């Protein structure tokens, strides 16, 4: 895999830069710009080397029809960017070292199908291709694996950072090694839970994932979100597995804290409880390596953030810990001050999980 650091003189050249600006929006405004900020080092380096840059990205909000206009507004705060409301502009002419952002590539039907025609059309716009979209590099799409067939292709700085930091977890992580798995998408995360129960010292399962374990263990979970049908009963015997001892539930439209054994049939679990957060924070404080993917609670509402924030603060205080946080759900409830104290905040959710499961991604393979 070739790095953009190896590129020398790019004056007079145009680089097609694939980023992942699929960021959360609220009322037409970006509410978390982590992925935008993460692309800036690559953009600045390419400009320093003299390149003009065409940025290709996507948003899958509103069934792939969402415009990247809100993203352009935020990006323009960091760099001078011209937004073009077309996915494949005709007769595009760029000034020296100019940056343009094209409209949501997902509006092109050939993107998800990896249509060679679309890949060729995109490749025709530039001289060099750079993939800096780690969080989308597990997708076999035209702008990820199609373009490298037609252009000299390189890895961006963020893509390299993702691989470097996640690879530590697969080799020889410092111990004690703690893994925290939260959120949803049991099918995606179960293989990692199984893997890390063998290689880590402890695996804590929270979020909606914990509901399935608790239900399988015979605990009442009320009307909480579950994904039945997964073979997790044998995992309950593993001494490395840690589960919530108390939770916060919505009971008759009120948030109530209770022990696991006191959950009622009409309850909906929205977060792990204070006791659990304190116990997990204690484990975090003694860990030398922590990998965390997915929030501990349903953070979108007025409740469900407390446990995640409390454990994040504990992790930020542990200066001897190598910490890797994956998934935008966690960063959505964190703060810039916390993020600066962590070793690495990954832009990838599903991509990070797949990389840890397989050791590579289709988008990485395409660059070789």
Image (cartoon, helix red, strand yellow):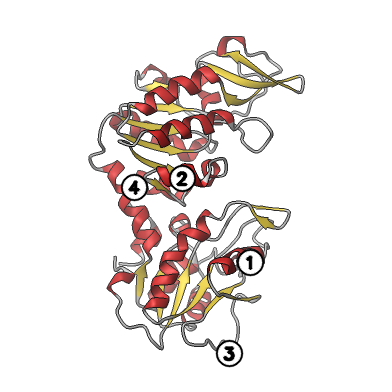
Camera sees residue 331 = yes
| Residue drawn at x 62%, y 71% as measured from the top left | 103
> What kind of element bears circle 2?
helix
Q: Position of residue 197 (x, y in %)?
A: 34, 28
SS under mark 4: helix
Residue identified by numbered label 2:
339
User: How far apart are the two marked residues, 2 and 1, measured between alpha carbons?
Assistant: 23 Å
Tell whether 207 sits left or right of 363. Answer: right
Q: Which sits in the foreground, 330 or 266?
A: 330
Is 300 rendered above or below residue 270?
below
Tell me: 232 left or right of 329. left
Which residue does the image show at 38% across and 86% down from the upper left? 11
Q: Residue furthest top?
A: 261
The residue carrying mark 3 is 91
* Rendered image: mark on residue 166: 4
**Image coords of residue 184 (percent x, y):** 55, 36
**Which residue is found at the position 44% from the left and 24% from the top?**
280
Q: Which mark is residue 73?
A: 1
Q: Are marks 4 and 3 in contact (CB under 8 Å)?
A: no
Q: Nearer the viewer, residue 284 or 336?
A: 336
Most foreground residue, 3 or 109: 3
Return the x and y of residue 285 as percentages of the image width and height.
Answer: 37, 27
Horizontal arrangement in the rendering, residue 322 relative to residue 245 (left or right): left
The quadrant holding residue 171 is top left
Q: Mark 2 near mark 3, Cβ–Cβ under 8 Å?
A: no
Label 3 neighbour load within 10 Å: few <14, some 14-19, many 20+: few
């Amino acid at each position: 895999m070739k790095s953009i650091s190896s590129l020398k003189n790019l004056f007079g050249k145009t680089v097609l830069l694939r980023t992942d600006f699929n960021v959360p929006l609220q009322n037409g405004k970006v509410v978390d710009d982590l992925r935008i900020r993460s692309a800036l080092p690559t953009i600045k380096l390419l400009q320093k080397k003299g390149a003009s840059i065409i940025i290709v990205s996507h948003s899958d909000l509103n069934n792939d029809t969402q415009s990247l206009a809100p993203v352009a507004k935020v990006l323009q705060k960091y760099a001078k960017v011209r937004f073009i409301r077309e996915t494949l502009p005709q007769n595009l002419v760029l000034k020296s070292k100019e940056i343009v952002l094209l409209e949501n590539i997902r509006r092109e039907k050939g993107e998800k199908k990896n249509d060679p025609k679309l890949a060729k059309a995109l490749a025709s716009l530039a001289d060099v291709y750079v993939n800096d979209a780690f969080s989308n590099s597990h997708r076999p799409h035209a702008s990820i694996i199609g373009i490298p067939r037609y252009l000299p292709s390189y890895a961006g700085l963020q893509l390299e950072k993702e691989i470097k930091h996640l690879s530590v977890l697969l080799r020889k992580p410092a111990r004690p090694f703690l893994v925290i798995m939260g959120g949803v998408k049991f099918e995606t995360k179960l293989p990692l839970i199984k893997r890390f129960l063998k290689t880590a010292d402890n695996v804590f399962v929270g979020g909606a994932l914990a509901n399935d374990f608790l239900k399988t263990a015979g605990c009442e979970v009320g009307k909480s979100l579950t994904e039945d049908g997964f073979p997790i009963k044998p995992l309950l015997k593993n001494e490395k597995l840690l589960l919530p001892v108390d939770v916060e539930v919505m009971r008759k439209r009120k948030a109530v804290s209770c022990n696991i054994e006191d959950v009622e049939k009409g309850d909906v679990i929205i977060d792990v409880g204070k006791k659990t957060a304190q116990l997990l924070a204690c484990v975090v404080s003694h860990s030398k390596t922590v990998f965390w993917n997915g929030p501990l609670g349903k953070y979108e509402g007025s409740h469900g953030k407390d446990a995640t924030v409390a454990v994040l603060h504990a992790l930020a205080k542990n200066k001897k810990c190598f910490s890797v946080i994956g998934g935008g759900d966690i960063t959505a409830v964190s703060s810039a001050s916390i993020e600066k104290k962590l070793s690495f905040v990954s832009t990838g959710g599903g991509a990070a999980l797949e990389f840890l499961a397989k050791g590579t991604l289709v988008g990485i393979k395409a660059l070789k």
